[in-house]
Amino acid sequence: MAGAIIENMSTKKLCIVGGILLVFQIIAFLVGGLIAPGPTTAVSYLSVKCVDVRKNHHKTKWLMPWGPNQCDRIRDIEEAIPREIEANDIVFSVHIPLPTMEMSPWFQFMLFILQLDIAFKLNNQIRENAEVSMDVSLAYRDDTFAEWTEMAHERVPRKLKCTFTSPKTPEHEGRYYECDVLPFMEIGSVAHKYYLLNIRLPVNEKKKINVGIGEIKDIRLVGIHQNGGFTKVWFAMKTFLTPSIFIIMVWYWRRITMMSRPPVLLEKVIFALGISMTFINIPVEWFSIGFDWTWMLLFGDIRQGIFYAMLLSFWIIFCGEHMMDQHERNHIAGYWKQVGPIAVGSFCLFIFDMCERGVQLTNPFYSIWTTDVGTELAMAFIIVAGICLCLYFLFLCFMVFQVFRNISGKQSSLPAMSKVRRLHYEGLIFRFKFLMLITLACAAMTVIFFIVSQVTEGHWKWGGVTVQVNSAFFTGIYGMWNLYVFALMFLYAPSHKNYGDDQSNESLSARQPSASSPASTQCFTVCMENGRIWPLQLGPP
């Protein structure tokens, strides 16, 4: 019988393959650390306070903070009092990007957070559970002389969470509250060169709109976007890895179809894992450079979710298929208890993502965390997904324990087995331990590099060389999981070699025991079922 390539490969060849994969792994880290810039850039924006005294504030006029057509501006709120400017006439204007700069499709996305500078006043304090209501308009253009085109116009409510650390006395008036930053806007593509935000804080005392929110002095925004240089390196990696995984996947499935038996469950799962990895690798992001595809962030989340669900399912099924002498195998229905939590958890995270980024396709200012109901719903989905992940982890640990317990039992009885059965079990034991080793190594590297990227400043310097740690984390881990899937499909593909030269003779003697052999009273035969060697104990002849 032909086993997997890893069972028939010599130690020397296995070390060569491992060395080649290690070289590619090092290259993946170096590409991000030495070639790519940091993955993201944060830019701070301070709004300009413009004055709009028109009766209809929502007409098509856009207020520019600077430039030849800049608005009538005031320096601070106190300046509005002698000029009899009402709160409803003040517009906080923000131009994206800063002067003399342009946005680019290579930036991929824009994420903005909001910071309010609120001064303490005895007669205008922040009430408990205060909510600020903003009337926000977003426009774009691709030429400095072109007219602005409206992209979105929404009422954006946000709950204030502010504290005042000093005593609330007259001498402390004018000091600022310490307020939490607020989610403001997220756009899944950067298809235009210039963007303009006009933010109004309409006051309506009858409807209690923007009453009891303190005295807002300034509005600050922090914009985060992906670096264009990192995007190009990321696209290049995807373009290189896509044909690599696709070719090995086709080769793997061709070797399976050449067998005289149908593919078994484990082979199907490895093939499905290759498909999910290929689905992530396909560089459809290239089209986002020429098209305004705001759904790319959501699409990327879905692709990653499919891959992780497939990877978790593979680990469960791989352990289950190596439960020696367990006959309820080779059927996906036998793993419904273990795979069920994966499906439920993935579905919860998918619904959560649709409620967040799905809605942002039509309303870039939406956030599920801004309302009590939305927060409770989001937490419910995350908690359910966390419970499912814990259940999965317990199932996986239990199955790994069972396999190692079976391994220890089989290893003690290996010398008494026939050569065919001994080689069969030795192959199972070796490939299980090998996969556990590289899986633990991959998981450990993922966790270690994630922690390092969080606790460092984002880059290291050695002499004149700067290493971008965050970029190295993204490219290295992404390359590592591609190499993991590549190694699985190569090493666990069916081999054209046999276990040994005398396997056929050993198998024949197992089927035809002599009268003088110990098997005359209790014989074993080896049969093929679903591509595996199954020992069947027979009664006396």
Image: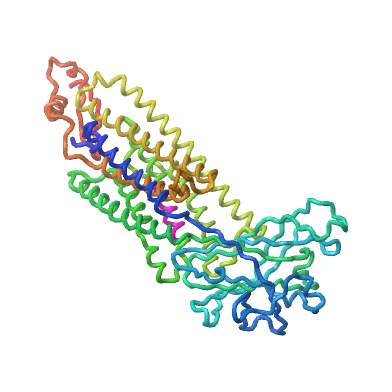
Tell me the quarter of the image containing the C terminus: top left
The residue depicted at 37 percent of the width and 59 percent of the height is: 235
Q: Where is residue 30 shown, x and y percent of the image?
A: 38, 47
Horizontally, is 94 left or right of 471 in the view? right
- Indicate the colouring scheme: rainbow
Q: Which of 293 and 21 is in front in this view?
A: 21
Query: Would you say residue 302 sits in the magenta stretch?
Result: yes
Query: Would you say residue 474 sits in the magenta stretch?
Result: no
Q: Which secondary structure is most common in the magenta stretch? A: helix
Placement of 518 over or under 208, stated as above or below: above
Q: Where is residue 255 shown, x and y percent of the image?
A: 20, 46
Tell me the quarter of the image containing the N terminus: top left
Placement of 210 over or under 279, stated as above or below: below
Residue 331 in view of the camera? yes
* The quadrant where residue 535 appears: top left
* The quadrant where residue 328 appears: top left
Horizontally, is 382 left or right of 432 in the view? right
* The quadrant where residue 173 appears: bottom right
Horizontally, is 75 left or right of 13 in the view? right
Q: Give the residue at the far front of this rendering.
A: 463
Residue 355 in view of the camera? no
Placement of 162 over or under 520, stated as above or below: below
The residue depicted at 48 percent of the width and 67 percent of the height is: 189
Q: Where is residue 166 shown, x and y percent of the image?
A: 81, 51
Q: State the extent of the magenta-drawn residues as a range.
A: 299-310
The residue depicted at 16 percent of the width and 36 percent of the height is: 497
Q: Where is residue 412 shown, x and y percent of the image?
A: 31, 19
Q: Nearer the viewer, residue 475 or 143?
A: 143
Q: Nearer the viewer, residue 155 or 216?
A: 216
